[in-house]
Amino acid sequence: MIGVVVLVCFSYIPFRLYRVLTYPALIVSMLMLVAVAFSSLGVTAGGASRWLQIGPLRFQPSELARLSLVVYLAYSMAKKDELLRDFYVGFLPHVMVLGLFVMLLVVQPDFGSMVIFAALTWIMLFVGGCRMSHLLMVVPVLAPMAWFFMTSADYRVRRLMSFLHPWEYRTDEGYQVVHSFMAFGTGGVTGVGLGKGYQKLFYLPEPHTDFIFSVVGEELGLIGVLVVIGLYTIMLMRGIHIARNTQDRFGAFLATGITATIGLQVCVNMGVTMGLLPTKGLTLPFLSYGGTSLLINMAAVGILMNIGARDGRR
């Protein structure tokens, strides 16, 4: 209910207002990530410090940081226009801001969010017209860094091996993925029935957050899975339509970023549950339990609706 209120409110706020809020939102997001890692307000759960506790309120700053990054990139890219093709003006500053976020996420650690942030930045710069040579030159730099990060801790190595050979690690690191496979397999074409899933009750960890798509597969079957994918596809197609038809450059980039961040979360979460990607703690937008994720995504869709409505009234 709160999410619906947030969506409606943001759908009426003129999207151009976010230009003024770009740098304050960016600074606040970074300070919150610093507080998570280096203050007593940070809450540790599951071996990671990703939450901020202020009184009775607990939230995940990385969700707000992702939206702040989208707004910053949209504002900066719209302002620089043709200068985006210049390395020192159009590419380097954006990568430096991304680097600051990545360093703060490394401390938590939150590798899933790092991947989303990096992919989001790459997509937006690509759409904005940044030189492909600039975008490709970071690959030889980031690939060794990513490999080092994945192999620098034993639990990450085990997670990588369980991704490659899940059935060999079905009693430890591959436990979630194997039971996710079982859930999809049990569901078949039509599913076992809504609320009648067995894996979520005794075997599948985090069935209400990271692996809720597996529950959909078990209870609603292939038909339910295709319906969910179809609904996400409609949402992403509408976002792309709004971005392509908006005359305001800031609005177009903002719509692109919002659409991309939702699409990336969907692809990563579904990929993990189906064993196509290594396990990452990313929720499925609008379906997974999680207040921060739901509210931020609702706000983002509200912004997207405002961009589309403004363009329609013009």
Image (spheres, helix red, strand yellow):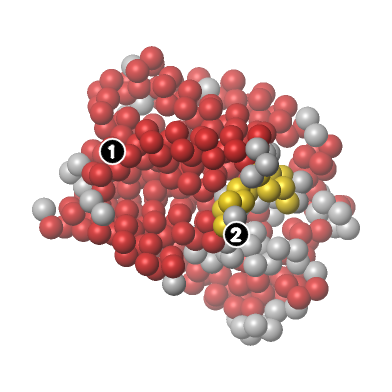
Amino acid identity at mark 1: Arg
Q: Is residue 280 visible?
A: no
Percent x, y for residue 82? 25, 23
Q: Is residue 233 above or below residue 86?
A: below
Precedes in sequence: disc 2 or disc 1: 1
* Residue at (32, 30) in percent of width and height: 76
Under tag 2, what secondary structure? loop
Q: Residues within 10 Å of mark 2 (few under 14, many from 20)?
A: few
| Residue 56, label in figure | 2
Residue tagged by mark 1?
Answer: 19
Residue 196 occupies which quadrant of the picture? bottom right
Percent x, y for residue 113? 58, 42
**Number of numbered labels in the structure image:** 2
Under tag 1, what secondary structure? helix
Percent x, y for residue 243? 28, 48
Residue 19 occupies which quadrant of the picture? top left
Percent x, y for residue 283? 58, 57
* Residue at (18, 53) in percent of width and height: 311
Q: Check the picture and name the quadrant holding the N terminus.
A: bottom left
Q: Is residue 188 left or right of residue 175?
A: left
Front-most of residues 34 and 292: 34
Amino acid identity at mark 2: Pro
In the displayed image of the protein, which residue is found farthest to the left?
314
Q: Is residue 173 above or below residue 113?
A: below
Q: Is residue 195 visible?
A: yes
Please tell me whether mark 2 or mark 1 is closer to you in this view: 2
Front-most of residues 221 and 67: 67
Q: Is residue 148 above or below residue 252?
A: above
